[in-house]
Image (spheres, rainbow, N blue to C red):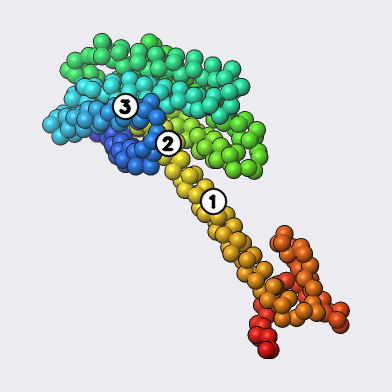
Amino acid sequence: MSSSTVGSIALPILLGSLLSLFCIGTLVAQVYIYPISFPNDRWPLKCLVYFLLVAMLIEIYLTISDINFWFSTSFGNEVALGDRRYSQYYTSISGALVGTVAQLFFVYRITRIRHDMWPLCVPIVIVAITGFAAGFGVGLKSFIEDDAPETFDINDIDGLHDRVHSVLFYLWLVGGAVADILIAVIMTILLRRTASHNATHAIARKIIYMVFETNLSSAAAVVITVILFVALPDNLYYLILEVPLSGIYANTLLATFNNRAIILHQRRIEASRHNTYVNETIEIRPRTLTVVQRFHRTHSSLSVIPEIESGAAVQYGSDSGSSESLSSVETMSFAPPNE
């Protein structure tokens, strides 16, 4: 048995597990940020966030347990690589569950932004639920028909891909990719329809654009997994992105929650700048009136135009017909009148 054959199995499993651990670590950081930034969110959103956290913590425990078995306890034993152990949970079952939850949430957000978009969301719901059923079927089939490690032939990886497994695998991942792409397309339509520059539409555009980006990233991961599964049937390279798929979806969903903090922070900065401008204007106008009134008392021959009360530029003239603007009056220094 060649070392390259062992490497074609061990390397994808190891890389996929490491990416999964990275995604879970990122998710823990996002869950830590969430209650600090949004302590007053509604309880369904909080339950969704903590459900994802619990699911990912279970996944990280099972992933570490499998890594310990494959690369520590059974190190050097090629037959041990044929023992699937708990991988069915954190690949197909968890990936299908978390992915479907994320897709349904994005559908809910679309209908909240534009109620008239619900007819376009119905196909997404159907495709997402179908993908979940297929992914759950892949994991369930693996649990039921799990062969003993001793019967595993490391040189016959293609034999693991029977017809039923392949059909369910395609339905799960292709369905997930289609749902993600449809969500991205609908978000593009919403972006084109919210072209106004007012503050409310500006916030909506930022949220829509972020959901568009995150769905494209998850769709790209799913599409690459399917391509590797079809193009390279003699190895397990598709596991590199299949194993961390649930973590990718979970981080996508949490990113949409926490990104609101950035948007709100930007809005506060803009509002603060606006309030500063208004306050400075309010402080300047009384000073302007005082200066002009003093100038009027000192030079009784000059006449101040009544438009000063409305904040307009004021012109004053002397007997010689010269005139200056109010901005010139503000910069002049006046000597006290002679007694």
Q: Quote the CA–CA distance across marks 2 and 3.
A: 14 Å
Amino acid marked by disc 3: Phe
Image location of residue 236, percent across then percent down = 33, 27
Q: Look at the numbered disc 2 and give the secondary structure of its residue.
A: helix
Q: Look at the numbered disc 3 and give the secondary structure of its residue.
A: helix
Q: Quote the CA–CA distance across marks 1 and 2.
A: 22 Å
Query: How crowded is the residue under tag 1: few (<14 C-alpha within 10 Å), some, or many (20+)?
Result: few
2 or 3: tag closer to the N-terminus: 3
Do tag 3 and tag 1 residues touch (Cβ < 8 Å)?
Answer: no
The quadrant where residue 173 appears:
top left
| Viewer-nearest residue: 187 or 13 | 187
Of all residues, the one furthest to the front in this rendering is 339
The quadrant where residue 54 appears:
top left
Residue depicted at x 36% and y 21%: 97
3 or 1: tag closer to the N-terminus: 3
Amino acid marked by disc 2: Phe
Residue to which mark 3 is pinned = 51
Q: Is residue 82 left or right of residue 290?
A: left
Q: Look at the numbered disc 1 and give the secondary structure of its residue.
A: helix
1 or 2: tag closer to the N-terminus: 2
**Residue 112 appears in view:** yes
Which image quarter holds the N terminus? Answer: top left
Residue to which mark 2 is pinned = 257
Q: Mark on residue 271? A: 1
The quadrant where residue 157 appears:
top left
**Residue 162 appears in view:** no
229 versus 274 height, above or below = above
45 versus 172 height, above or below = below
Amino acid marked by disc 1: Ala
Q: Quote the CA–CA distance across marks 3 and 1.
A: 35 Å
